[in-house]
Image (tube, coloured by chain):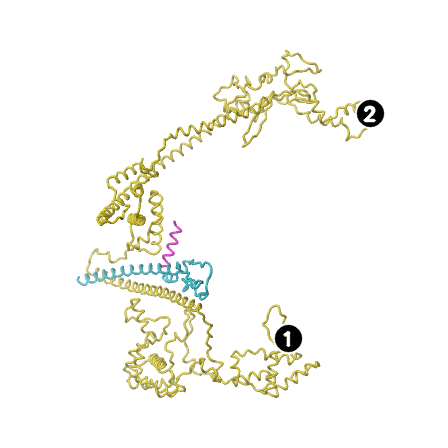
Chain colours: A yellow, B cyan
């Protein structure tokens, strides 16, 4: 007993527990048990809940009462509540509350299974071979270990007697004996399920025999059926996976019954009657609904039945449907499995045959050598057979499908229309039952299409005659390929025809007029201010003449040469040449001293110098006599505008906007005055002036910065011309060569393609003709039928009116000619 | 000499039988393959009963897991060539498959 702690509650609870101990099965104990049960509600362990961990040395300090509660509560008896009342179990459960007292333990009486059998090793010495798979199938052990009956010593004695009686002539093996006994057992269970009530009423052998023969013990019938289905010879023995290995040597039950039935049955019957509750072997306990109340010590060890869930109509339907599906699946699987079995059988036969052939060949060879026969060897060697396997078949199918698709694209549109109600190749195949050549397929398809058309037409019986005609035409189109639909004369619209050329010309004219109008409008808007150069792409700005040394043939090669072009006339600036020469009258020149040079002084080139600070605006800069302006209009159209470069307004006027000249002057006057540097206008001016200081092609001394156009790599212009020219020449030659080679290659391939196409068309034409002939035949037949129907007076009109064959033929040939040309 | 002729005749017969057996074998293999395809890729494998569907087809191979449950939504019926348990149980088939793969590779 653990020492009680000082806690008062503990002492109280201890006394309580002692009480219960004293009482044993008394009512007080059970009451406390029940109360503690109700007090201690045990919950499931969850991660959120803290659990206390007790160490071993904590145990003695633990609350006794608490522990007991736990013990009682934690016992999961594993039996149903009402079964806990079974005497032994009940006692144990009750004692469980107080078993800490080291009292003698109680047991539920169970048969002793702890003794060892000395001879075990003698009988069970089979070695365990690990199977390739752990799960072979999901049958119960009982299903797979042969006869369920197990011989014991008594049976062995009987067997020995039996053997003596037969004197070794016709012996029964142990397996056979077991089979017999198992058969008896199952038959009796079927005939006399309540034998235990009166064991002596066991049927005689003769009475039981029909049942025995009828019952399909060890699935003999099933096996024979299987053998039959696979095609095995009846005498060939085989085992399924469900069969025990011992079964292969046993004779069938019917034979055994004839031979040993009465003898063995006598022995078996004797044992049956002797044994308790008429079972020779102990049986597993099953739950029987009517025996539920029975207090049986073994009740805890019975095999439990699954409780049936509630049934509803819907669930019933679902389940039955599922069972049906399951059946279907199993049927499928069985079918496949049987096929596999057949295949295996065939392959076994094949192997045997192979061996057979080999042996025969050997013998033939031997004889042949001894007889000295020459030749006749073809049977003696293995010929490689081209076997069609699944994959080859698939490949073939795929290729055919691809070829068909290619055919579909090359054939005309009407046939493609026909493909809409096409029958797939497979269907056709299945219909005809064997593989078809491509051509046959095509024919069949066209037939089916025609049939479909007929069906359609016959559905729409009341057709207007012209509609009929149209359909006829359509049918013709299925034969001859045409892009345009030919309308009947009644449907051709009454219109004056216009030539395409005229229409196009008109359109072009309108477009031009539109552009013209727009341009005029723009010119009016521009007025005299801007001159638009872009309204005519050939509007020359300058007349350019080549200098004397340059010939027109090599001039375009050199961009450098263009610098030597001479502008003889400018259209927009009349005096351009003069400006360029420096002899313009508009430009005034001054000497170093600032004196104006006379107009006719030709020694000084009057080149304009741009100087915005020059108050005299008559001096022009070196800018162009005309101003061009690039302008981007709507739709990204670029305009080049020209504006006459006349500086009419005073420069100072503009400058005075930026500079305060008065302030500068004042500052100049009072040079001694100190002012803030940042406010100095003079400084501003000088800085401003600096900005323009170098905006001139001349240096400070009035010399040109560069005289000539830049020379590339210090090579003279003429050399550049030659170099550049030759470079361009060789490059263009290479390009030309490449292009010609490419062109030739293309030409060759085109010719090849054309040839191929021609061949294809020939083939197609051939096919079409064949197809046509068939159709004609059909149609003629149809016609005959039609005639008959007409005679009968029925008003059904078949739209598939026959077509005169020569006309059609000529049509086709014409069509093919067209496509050829 | 007669014995020789007889033997030859026997050999011829055997060869003929062998050829027939080979044909039979090929036919069976093809049949198994086709049936298997049909079974595994069962087109109408969605059977609707009382508003719920059950997947059917290929359960022998894939297991009956969830067979008793009803499925909603699209049940996929893809199957892999490795599922061809019945065909694959033949070594010849496996060999052919291998060769086919090789040929594909070459192409």
| Residue highlighted by disc 2 | A672
Other-residue count near label 2 (Cα within 10 Å), few / some / many at <14 / 14–19 / ≥20: few
Mark earlier in primary sequence (1, 2): 1
Chain ID at mark 2: A
Task: Relative to A380, say whether A111 is above or below.
Answer: below
Can you give x and y, in whole percent of width and height, for residue A415 in the image? 33, 45
Q: Is residue A815 visible?
A: yes
Which of the 4 quarters of the picture holds residue A72?
A: bottom right
Other-residue count near label 1 (Cα within 10 Å), few / some / many at <14 / 14–19 / ≥20: few
Left or right: residue A393 compared with residue A28:
left
Determine if the magenta segment contains residue A117. Answer: no
Q: For the magenta stretch, what is the residue range?
A: B92-107
Task: Relative to A412, say whether A336 is above or below.
Answer: below
Inter-mark Cα distance, 1 to 2: 107 Å
Can you give x and y, in whole percent of width and height, for residue A398 in the image? 36, 51
Determine the secondary structure under disc 1.
loop
Task: Relative to A291, say whether A347 is above or below.
Answer: above
Can you give x and y, in whole percent of width and height, for residue A656 in the image? 72, 25
Q: Is residue A703 visible?
A: no
Of helix, strand and loop, which mostly describes the magenta segment? helix
Can you give x and y, in whole percent of width and height, for residue A742 in the image? 40, 34
Front residue of A241/A153: it is A241
Chain ID at mark 1: A
Labels 1 and 2 in the same subunit: yes
| Residue highlighted by disc 1 | A54
Left or right: residue A488 compared with residue A535:
left
Q: Which mark is residue B1?
A: none
Determine the secondary structure under disc 2.
loop
Determine if the magenta segment contains residue B105. Answer: yes
Front residue of A420/A87: it is A420
Q: Identify the image quadrant of the C terminus of chain A.
A: top left
């Amino acid at each position: 007993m653990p020492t009680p702690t000082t806690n008062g509650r503990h002492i109280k609870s201890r006394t309580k527990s002692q009480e219960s101990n004293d009482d044993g099965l008394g009512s007080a104990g059970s009451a406390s048990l029940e109360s503690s049960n109700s007090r201690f509600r045990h919950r499931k362990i969850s991660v959120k809940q803290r659990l206390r961990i007790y160490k071993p040395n904590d145990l003695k300090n633990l609350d006794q009462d608490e522990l007991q509660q736990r013990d009682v509560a934690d016992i999961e008896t594993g039996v149903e509540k009402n079964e806990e009342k079974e005497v032994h179990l009940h006692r144990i459960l009750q004692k469980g509350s107080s078993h800490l007292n080291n009292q003698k333990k109680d047991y539920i009486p169970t048969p002793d299974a702890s003794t060892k059998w000395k001879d075990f090793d003698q009988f069970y010495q089979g070695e365990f071979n690990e199977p390739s798979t752990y799960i072979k199938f999901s049958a119960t052990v009982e299903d797979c270990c042969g006869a369920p009956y197990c011989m014991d010593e008594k049976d062995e004695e009987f067997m020995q007697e039996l053997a003596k009686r037969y004197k070794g002539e016709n012996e029964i093996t142990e397996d056979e004996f077991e089979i017999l006994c198992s058969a008896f057992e199952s038959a009796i269970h079927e005939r006399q399920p309540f034998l235990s009530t009166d064991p002596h009423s066991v049927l005689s052998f003769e009475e039981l025999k029909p049942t025995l023969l009828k019952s399909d013990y060890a699935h003999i019938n099933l096996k024979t059926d299987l053998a039959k289905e696979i095609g095995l010879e009846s005498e060939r023995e085989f085992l399924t996976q469900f069969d025990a290995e011992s079964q292969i040597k046993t004779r069938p039950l019917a034979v055994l019954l004839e031979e040993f039935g009465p003898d063995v049955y006598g022995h078996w019957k004797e044992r049956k009657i002797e044994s308790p509750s008429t079972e020779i072997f102990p049986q597993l306990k099953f739950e029987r609904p009517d025996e539920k109340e029975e207090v049986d010590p073994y009740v805890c060890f019975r095999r439990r039945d699954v409780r049936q869930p509630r049934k509803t109509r819907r669930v019933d339907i679902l389940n039955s449907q599922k069972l049906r599906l399951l059946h279907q699946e199993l049927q499928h699987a069985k079918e496949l499995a049987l096929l596999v079995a057949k295949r295996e059988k065939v392959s076994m036969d094949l192997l045997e045959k192979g061996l057979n052939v080999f042996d025969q060949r050997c013998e033939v060879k031997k004889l042949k050598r001894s007889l000295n026969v020459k030749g006749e060897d073809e049977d003696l060697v293995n010929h490689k057979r081209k076997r069609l396997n699944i994959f080859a078949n698939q490949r073939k199918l795929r290729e055919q499908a691809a070829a068909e698709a290619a055919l579909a694209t090359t054939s005309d549109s009407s046939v493609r229309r026909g493909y809409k109600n096409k029958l797939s190749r497979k269907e056709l195949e299945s219909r005809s039952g064997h593989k078809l050549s491509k051509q046959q397929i095509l024919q069949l398809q066209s037939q089916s299409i025609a049939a479909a058309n007929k069906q359609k037409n016959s559905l729409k019986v009341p057709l207007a005659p012209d509609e009929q005609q149209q359909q006829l035409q359509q049918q013709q189109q299925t034969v001859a390929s045409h892009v345009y639909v030919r309308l009947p004369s009644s449907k051709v619209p009454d219109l004056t025809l216009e030539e395409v050329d005229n229409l196009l010309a008109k359109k072009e004219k309108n477009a031009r007029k539109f552009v013209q109008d727009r341009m005029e409008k723009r010119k009016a808007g521009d007025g005299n201010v801007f001159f638009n150069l872009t309204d005519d792409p050939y509007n020359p700005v300058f007349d350019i003449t080549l200098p004397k040394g340059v010939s027109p043939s090599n001039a375009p090669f050199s961009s450098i040469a263009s610098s030597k072009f001479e502008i003889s006339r400018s259209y927009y600036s009349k005096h351009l040449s003069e400006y360029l020469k420096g002899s313009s009258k508009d430009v005034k020149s001054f000497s170093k001293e600032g004196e104006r040079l006379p107009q006719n002084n030709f020694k000084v080139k009057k080149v304009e110098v741009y100087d915005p600070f020059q108050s005299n605006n008559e001096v022009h800069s070196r800018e162009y006599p005309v101003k061009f302006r690039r302008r981007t209009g709507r739709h990204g159209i670029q305009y080049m505008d020209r504006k006459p470069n006349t500086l009419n307004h005073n420069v100072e006027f503009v400058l005075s906007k930026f500079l305060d000249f008065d302030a500068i002057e004042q500052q100049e006057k009072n040079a001694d005055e100190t002012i803030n540097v940042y406010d100095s206008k003079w400084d501003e001016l000088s800085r401003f002036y600096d900005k323009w200081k170098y905006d001139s092609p001349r240096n400070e001394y009035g010399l040109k910065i560069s005289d000539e156009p830049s020379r590339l790599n210090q090579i003279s212009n003429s050399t550049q011309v030659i170099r550049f020219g030759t470079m361009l020449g060789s490059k263009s030659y290479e390009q030309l060569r490449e292009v010609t080679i490419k062109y030739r290659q293309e030409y060759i391939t085109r010719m090849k393609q054309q040839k191929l196409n021609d061949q294809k068309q020939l083939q197609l034409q051939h096919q079409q003709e064949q197809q046509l002939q068939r159709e004609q035949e059909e149609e003629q037949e149809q016609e005959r039928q039609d005639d008959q129907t007409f005679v009968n007076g029925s008003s059904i009109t078949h739209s598939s009116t026959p077509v005169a064959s020569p006309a059609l033929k000529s049509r086709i040939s014409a069509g093919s000619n067209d496509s050829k040309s | 000499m007669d014995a020789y002729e007889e033997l030859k005749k026997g050999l011829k017969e055997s060869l003929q039988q062998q050829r027939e057996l080979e044909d039979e074998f090929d036919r069976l293999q093809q049949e198994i393959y086709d049936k298997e395809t049909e079974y595994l890729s069962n087109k109408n494998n969605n059977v609707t009963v009382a508003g719920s569907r059950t997947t059917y087809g290929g359960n022998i191979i894939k297991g009956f897991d969830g067979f008793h449950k009803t499925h909603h939504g699209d049940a996929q019926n893809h199957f892999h060539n490795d599922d061809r348990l019945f065909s694959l149980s033949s070594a010849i088939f496996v060999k052919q498959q291998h060769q086919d793969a090789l040929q594909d590779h070459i192409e």
